[in-house]
Amino acid sequence: MTQTHPFVEIRHAQKSYGKLEVLKDISLSVERGQIVAIIGPSGSGKSTLLRAINDLDPLTSGEVWLDGLQVNKSLPHRQYENHINEMRQQIGMVFQHFNLFPHLTVRENVTMAPKLLKKISDKEADALAEEQLDHVGMLERIDYYPSQLSGGQKQRVAIARALAMKPKLMLFDEATSALDPELVEEVNLVMKKLAEEHMTMIIVTHEMDFAASVCDRVIFMDKGLVVEEGPPELVFKNPTQERTQVFLRKHLEGAK
Amino acid sequence: MGLDFSVIPPFYGTLALGVLWTIAITAASAVLSFFGGILLAVVALYGPLVVRLPFRFVAWLFMGTPLLLQLFLIYFGLAQIGVDLPAFVAGVIGLGFHYAVYNSELIQTAMVAVDKGQMEAARTLGLSRRQALMRVIVPQAVRDVLPPIGNNMIALLKDSALVSVIGVSELTLSAQLAIGRTYRPFEFYAAAAVLYYVINLGMEAVLRGFEKRNRLSR
Ligand SMILES: Nc1ncnc2c1ncn2[C@@H]1O[C@H](COP(=O)(O)OP(=O)(O)OP(=O)(O)O)[C@@H](O)[C@H]1O
Ligand SMILES: [Mg+2]
């Protein structure tokens, strides 16, 4: 019997910190090339869910699957380490605070992991860095250090660094929340470009307009539960759940 | 007896050789203390408990006892149980490990202070923990404590005089040799002091060079 899996599948994800249940039985799936936004109030578990996908914050119970392989497969410690390192190479992640490596140049930030893990030559690495940095419009800064870049530029380099591993899936955790307002757009543009190239993406965001314009589906989370999900037109314009309505109303007021 | 510095020139060769040995033993011990310090720091923070505890104990021994005694123990003590090390090697081991322990304390503190997002970013790319430590955490920690490590290196240079007692003919022992022949302690100890000072200046210049190279990368 062959069973077709969704490209990304989360099954009954549950996560507790001590007595605090942060994720309560969440299941969701994402098709190849789909772009999903996760929205919700602070503390609702958005980051925790996202970070469970690459096992940065392991689930208490539940399964995460990517392209037919279980990410959080239970294996003996040593084997698991190898397995998860390989899975993570296929899952790019972009953080709110960039987390570029400050002791390395932009070029080295992009090439370190591919050189180390894919054993590519220096020449191939340089070509890769140039390609990826060109893609995010950062080629001119290839030999700068992160400390010499603006926030928006740092985030674009961080995206290039993740893309250099040729991931199948990209995770964004509030990629623009730490940026000055005038720098948000340049990062959003890069993400839109990825969307046009049909990169599969899961995006935690507080920017409803951006979510509405690039995402195929919006997931509203509250208190560790998926309260509502659907296409952006529906979730943003005609939310069926009261909690979604309250959140969106508050958010609109906050944005003004 | 007045001062007469004209006694020095005939011993230029002796003193020059002393300077070379001092530089050699300092450089070798500095390299050992640097990489040993990194290794000790990583093991102290991330090693398995069975390794961590003995390491802690040895570190405590090196920090809690006089360096002079450690040198005697490594050179004379080990010889007695059949481990006959050349004086130079014994000196490098003693000085190197002694300062490795101090460097490791600095590096550990700095490693803990590296933003935890750095480890997360590295692991997210697929690096193993060891790769992340060696490529991301340790370089940043070392960069952050380069000035105090530099101070340790200067202290190491000065403590290298101690290896004269196990017979390494470095600068202090060379001066003593010349004094034995001339009975002119003031002139030769003063000459040695000046030479230490000059080596010190050279070393500080090298350290400043390293620190400058690091300026942008933070
Ligand atoms: N390491 C931890 N230990 C204990 N509790 C934690 C830990 N990490 C997160 N939490 C808790 O889990 C809950 C969900 O956190 P999470 O960061 O996933 O929320 P979020 O939806 O991303 O919020 P925000 O919009 O503020 O980023 C919060 O109540 C938080 O305090
Ligand atoms: Mg969050």
Image (cartoon, rainbow, N blue to C red):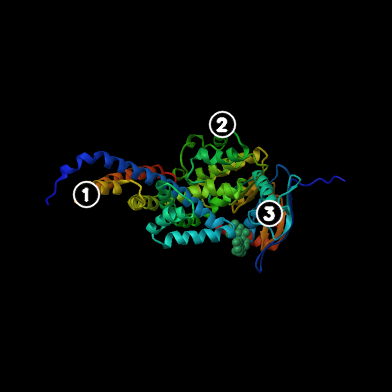
Q: Assess disc 3: are there few (<14), some (14-19) or many (≥20) residues with their C-alpha within 10 Å of its C-alpha.
A: few
Give the amino acid type for the residue marked by disc 2 in the picture: Ala
CA gap between label 1 and label 3 equals: 62 Å
Residue sitting farthest toward the left: B2
- Crowding at mark 1 (Cα within 10 Å: few <14, some 14-19, many 20+): few
Q: Considering depth in this image, is A37 or B214 the residue closer to the camera? A: B214
For mark 3, name the chain. Answer: A
Residue on which the image places disc 1: B190
Residue ID for mark 2 = A127
User: Residue B6, how many percent across, how many down?
Assistant: 16, 42
Q: Does ligand 1 reach within 8 Å of label 3's beta carbon?
A: no
Direction bottom: furthest residue? A19
Q: Tell which quarter ligand 2 is in.
A: bottom right
Do the residues marked 1 and 3 share a common chain? no
Residue found at the very far right of the displayed protein? A1
Discs 3/2, front: 3
Name the residue beneath numbered marker 3: A77
Within 10 angstroms of label 2, few (less than 14), some, or many (20 or more) residues? few
Q: Secondary structure at mark 1?
A: helix
Give the chain of mark 1. B
Q: Name the amino acid type tagged 1.
A: Ala
Asked if marks 2 and 1 touch (Cβ < 8 Å), the reply is no
Q: Tag 2 or tag 3, which sits nearer the N-term?
A: 3
Estimate the spatial distance between the alpha carbons at disc 3 and disc 2, rounded to whole Å: 36 Å
Query: Residue B142 location in percent, x, y?
Result: 45, 49
**Cα distance in 3D space between marks 2 and 1:** 59 Å
Q: Position of residue A112 (x, y in %)?
A: 55, 40
